[in-house]
Amino acid sequence: EHMGQKLNSYVDWLLLPAAVSMLGGPAICVPCGVTQAGLPVGLSLAGPPGAERRVIAAAAAFERAHAWRGMVPRTPAPL
């Protein structure tokens, strides 16, 4: 789900980071919690070209400000 819109397939989800990549700016994903079902959730941060240090600094600040570092998602069910 993205901004309330259900993503029906992996390809739908992939369009979001692909758009950021095509713009040539840096991007990073940091853990930000788990769903009610125990599945991990990530926060994607992106910046303009050349802003690598700012994006990494923002991700590091987020991680320092939140306790998500110590959380462990549920063990996946065997396939």
Image: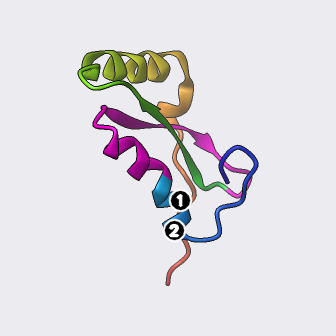
Q: Is residue 4 magenta?
A: no
Q: Quadrant of the rendered structure where residue 20 is?
A: top left
- Give the secondary structure at mark 2: helix
Q: Nearer the viewer, residue 38 or 56?
A: 56
Q: Look at 43% across and 15% down and name the residue there.
A: 61
Residue assigned mark 1: 13
| Cα gap from disc 1 to disc 2, whole angstroms | 5 Å
Label 1 Cα crowd, 10 Å radius (few <14 / some 14-19 / many 20+):
some
Q: Residue drawn 53% across and 39% down?
A: 71
| Of 22 and 1, the residue lying toward us | 22
Q: Which residues, given as a range, are shown in magenta?
A: 16-37
Residue 17 on image: x %, y %: 43, 48
Residue 10: give its label: 2
Residue depicted at 23% across the width and 21% down the height: 50
Mark number, residue 35:
none
Tell me the kind of residue under disc 1: Trp
Left or right of 69, for residue 21: left
In this picture, residue 40 sits left or right of residue 55: right
Q: In front: 42, or 69?
A: 42
Above/below status of 40 relative to 49 = below
| Residues marked 1 and 2 touching at CB (< 8 Å) | yes
Q: Residue at x 55, y 52 (%)?
A: 73
The vertical placement of 68 against 79, above or below, is above
